[in-house]
Image (spheres, rainbow, N blue to C red):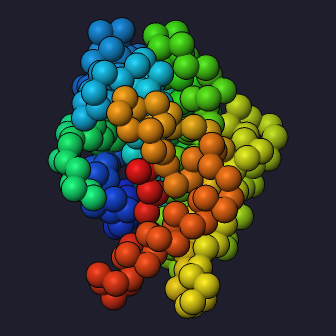
Amino acid sequence: MIQLRDTVERTLAGLPKLEGAFSPAVRLAPTADGLTLGDIPAPALHRLLADATASEEAPDKKLDAAYLIGTFAFCLAEPLVGLALRGHWLCGADPAGVALTPRFEKWTEDGETGVEQVFDICLDPSLLAFDRHADATRFAQTVQDLITPLCVAINATTGLSRPALFMLVSDSFAYAFLAHGRQLEQQDHAMALALASFGQRGTRLFTKKLRFEHISLPEAPEIGEWIRVRGGCCRAYTRPGKPDYCTTCVLRDDQSRTERYRTYLRRIWRTQDKPQPKDICK
């Protein structure tokens, strides 16, 4: 890691913000302060779980759990996948080497408003190792090692199963591969690496349902985008008074998902020159 530190730091500084203000601020420094993945006290975890669903009415514990792990995993995936696709593959890490700092961002979408808890990330270079060569299996194993203490704690606190939590982690990382691949104009390569990391047996992050699908408009085949089809469930369908659920939800059939995304493409294409594809969760 000592030899790679300068190049990793420069790459981190140049990574695009995939989700604008909701993207994490990331720095490479000792993680002496704040919550680390290796030690999140119970009171802090309870607060993080409650804040994960701050904009929902009467959420249950499992919705808290799904929102928390999905959001945090994507905040972690943004820099780690961004580094990987630019030649710095995480190949070893101690959970104590990743610190998280929660914050809130306001959002407005389709007439609704709310706040979302997101996380800034601090990576301790003395507790991380990177390799210039892609090793999808080792990458997935390292991510598993990092995220396992948090998944175990969330499972014990909320009852959401560990396999369900791990699948949500895989979904978040797979989406980050797609989004960074889009930025680099290397979507095919990025999707292949995502499937090699999380679509192959060998770690708890394996999910056989994870896949990518290209959806275009019948009336304009040149208008289309790749989406990530979930392997796990974010449990958005359980929101009180909001029976609708994610476009990429595992509870949707292929036709329903395709038509919903086509509706999104038509709406966006009418309002701007080019859509900014996203992980629709409504």
Residue 192 x, y percent position in the rendering? 71, 64
Using residue 172 as the reference point, say whether residue 125 is left or right of it. Answer: left
The structure residue drawn at horizontal position 73% and vertical position 40%, both measured from the top left corner, is 206
Q: Nearer the viewer, residue 96 or 267?
A: 267
Relative to the observer, which residue lies in front, 149 or 59? 59
- Residue 86, image x and y in percent? 52, 67
The outermost residue toward the right is 201
Q: Is residue 117 above or below residue 189?
A: above
Q: Nearer the viewer, residue 172 or 5?
A: 172
Q: Is residue 141 left or right of residue 112?
A: right
Q: How far from the left and from the top, in percent, is residue 109?
A: 26, 57
Please tell me whether residue 241 is drawn above or below residue 83 in the rendered image.
Answer: above
* Residue 92 seen in render: no
Q: Report whether residue 254 is seen.
A: yes
The residue shown at (29%, 81%) is: 271
Which residue lies at the image location 55% right of the left edge and 43% below the top edge? Answer: 129
